Image (cartoon, grey):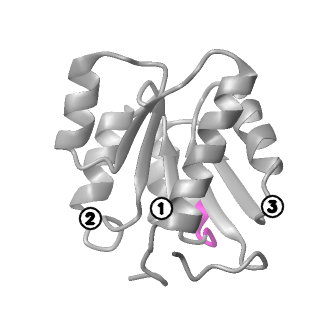
Amino acid sequence: MNDRTALTPIKILLVEDNPGDVLLTTLAMNESKMKIIIDNVTDGEQAVEYLKKEGKYGDATRPDLILLDLNLPKKSGFEVLKEIKEDEELRRIPIAVLTMSRAEEDILRSYNLHANCFISKPIDFEQFSKVVKSIEDFWFTIVKLPNGEK
């Protein structure tokens, strides 16, 4: 079991350009008993800048989990995933690919780039909410994550 308490905020970086999916994810996470802080960036370049604390993201804090869409402007989710997993300081942050894709080649490519899991987004809110709750339960109550910046 995880050492987290209900009072310890969980930080999620949501890399998603679709406002509807951002809203669905936020609504589903707001149903949580845990305190969850969601930061959203809308393209791949912003995701990397956020994680490397560059530009306007100089005061960003390291997320406990990254929810990453694959179809992003400026830099694809695959490019973001590759860059994160090649970075010594960032590679241990778990990345859940959360995308509309169900294509076998996208699944295989994501895992080859060291995604921690691949989840296809359900269409309706009830199913989407269940998926988000499952992500939360797995990553923040079952899995043991490393603490701190390193």
Query: What is the span of residues highlighted in magenta in the rendered image?
Result: 56-60
In space, the residues marked 3 and 1 are separated at their CA atoms by 26 Å
Q: Earlier in the sequence, mark 3 or mark 1?
A: 3
Which three-letter amino acid code belongs to the residue tagged 2? Asp
Q: Nearer the viewer, mark 3 or mark 2?
A: 3
Q: Which disc, if any, is residue 51?
A: 1
Which three-letter amino acid code belongs to the residue tagged 1? Leu
Question: Considering only vertical position in the picture, is 21 above or below 44?
Answer: above
**Residues marked 1 and 2 touching at CB (< 8 Å):** yes
Q: Earlier in the sequence, mark 3 or mark 2?
A: 3
Q: Which disc, if any, is residue 33?
A: 3
Residue pointed to by mark 2 = 87
Q: Residue at x 66, y 45 (%)?
A: 133
Q: Residue at x 58, y 35 (%)?
A: 16
Element marked by disc 3: loop
- Name the quadrant containing residue 113: top left
In space, the residues marked 1 and 2 are separated at their CA atoms by 10 Å
* Residue 57 in the figure: left or right of residue 20: left
Viewer-proximal residue among 120 and 21: 120
Residue 38 seen anywhere in this rendered image of the structure:
yes
**Residues marked 3 and 1 touching at CB (< 8 Å):** no
Say how many tags the image has.
3
Instruction: Residue 52: give x, y in percent of width and height.
Output: 44, 65
In space, the residues marked 3 and 2 are separated at their CA atoms by 33 Å
Q: Residue at x 75, y 40 (%)?
A: 28
